[in-house]
Amino acid sequence: LEAFFHYRNVDVSTLKELAKRWKPEAYSSFKKAQKHTALADVHESIEELAHYRTNFLSL
């Protein structure tokens, strides 16, 4: 399992909290589907990261 992870992993929850405080419009413009299955949560986190990359980090 350790081989799949790297110390440079991105924590999407941290980006979400920063967006909530520093750019609320970027935070509020992402709506979760709330499916709560493991695979759906992974896909949703990837979509959320892409959203914050575009709308919060402007990359």
Image: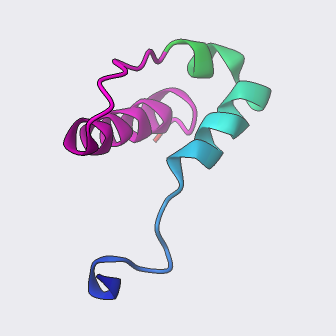
Q: Position of residue 25 (x, y in %)?
A: 63, 13
Q: Position of residue 2 (x, y in %)?
A: 35, 86
* Residue visible at 60% across and 36% down in the picture: 16
Overall secondary structure of the magenta section? helix
- Snapshot quadrant of residue 57: top right
How many numbered discs, if any? 0
- Snapshot quadrant of residue 36: top left
Looking at the image, the residue that sits furthest to the right is 21
Q: Position of residue 52 (x, y in %)?
A: 49, 34
Q: Position of residue 7 (x, y in %)?
A: 50, 80
Q: Is residue 31 left or right of residue 46?
A: right
Looking at the image, the residue that sits furthest to the left is 39
Q: Is residue 14 left or right of residue 59?
A: right
For the N terminus, the quadrant is bottom left
For the C terminus, the quadrant is top left
In reply to whether residue 49 is colored magenta, the answer given is yes
Stretch of the chain drawn in magenta: 30-58
Closer to the camera, 48 or 36?
36
* Residue visible at 60% across and 22% down in the picture: 27
Looking at the image, the residue that sits furthest to the front is 37
Closer to the camera, 38 or 44?
38
* Residue visible at 29% across and 45% down in the picture: 42
- Snapshot quadrant of residue 48: top left
In reply to whether residue 56 is colored magenta, the answer given is yes
Q: Is residue 28 left or right of residue 18?
A: left
